[in-house]
Image (spheres, rainbow, N blue to C red):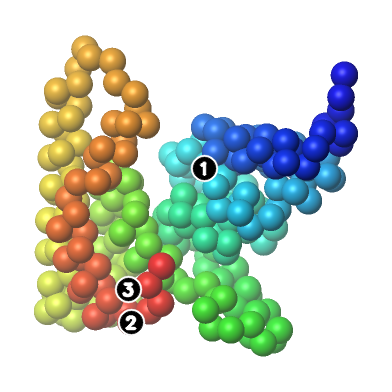
Amino acid sequence: MVSFTQLPIEVVDLIIIMLAISTNGAREIATISATCKLFKNLAERAHVLREVNFRCLALTEDFSMHHHPKDLLCVCTQIGNQAAKNIFAKALLYDDWWFKQLIVESNQEALDLRVSYSGLLDYHSIVRSFIRHGSCADMVKMYEYLLNYVISFVGYKVASRFGILDAIYTMCFEMFKIIKEHHRRSLGSPRDPDVYTTKLNYQVREERKKVIVIFDQLFPCRPV
């Protein structure tokens, strides 16, 4: 039997990519990387990290297990993995001090190494990305945290004047109605959960856009 290290690099690369995009991709990549140096080195390439599936962490509210700068979630966020950024954004919205400090320290280290500004992490860019790409279920769940995030930076009066509080409410309320209606229609009928979730997330586009437009006025940042 041919061992993993004896396989052609093209085959190994395909195996890693397929593993990364699987439902438990993040967990599998982290587990195998801890025991196989070759696998770890190959899995740490940017094109692999951008594809890692974080569905197994989508429902987590305890981010303490990821409090390490080399944690897969943190590394993938910095590489630009959207699923990782969505979870990272939720940690910021939950006011997780460690993740906030990671941004400060990572940016300072990058500046010391003279990395361009485009290579820096940014609170508002990550949250903006979550508003743009986050699932409907996550957006509804994070409704109050989104409001608190905005108010904590610009204050209630400014947020109200710009209309972002109402925009967030409308967006989340429309998402809630759509989720509720889909649940009602799908009772008793088998569905592919991935197709179902994807279909939901492509709706309420105009409401998302409105929030993004106002968000950009309040927090000029690098779009992600």
The percent coordinates of residue 184 (x first, y second) are 14, 24
Element assignment for label 1: loop
Q: Residues within 10 Å of mark 1 (few under 14, many from 20)?
A: many
Q: Nearer the viewer, mark 1 or mark 3?
A: 1
Check the image and name the residue furthest to the top.
188
Mark 1 to mark 3 CA distance (whole Å): 29 Å
Q: Taking the image as drawn, is residue 127 in sight?
A: no
Element assignment for label 2: loop
At horizontal 26% and vertical 72% (from top left) the residue drawn is: 215
Q: Quadrant of residue 171?
A: bottom left
Q: Quadrant of residue 25?
A: top right
Q: Taking the image as drawn, is residue 18 in sight?
A: yes
Q: Amino acid at mark 1?
A: Phe
The count of marks equals: 3
Q: Which mark is residue 72?
A: none
Q: Residues within 10 Å of mark 3 (few under 14, many from 20)?
A: few
Q: Which mark is residue 220?
A: 2
The percent coordinates of residue 117 (x first, y second) are 54, 83
Name the quadrant of the N terminus. top right
Find out whether the residues at labels 2 and 3 contact each other: C-beta distance under 8 Å: no
The percent coordinates of residue 74 (x first, y second) are 60, 58
The residue pinned by badge 3 equals 152
Element assignment for label 3: helix
Q: Amino acid at mark 2?
A: Pro
Residue 174 vs 22, above or below: the answer is below
Mark 2 to mark 1 CA distance (whole Å): 28 Å
Q: Quadrant of residue 24?
A: top right
At horizontal 26% and vertical 80% (from top left) the residue drawn is: 218
The percent coordinates of residue 195 (x first, y second) are 32, 31
Mark 2 to mark 3 CA distance (whole Å): 16 Å
The residue pinned by badge 1 equals 54
Label whose residue precedes the other's in the sequence (1 or 3): 1
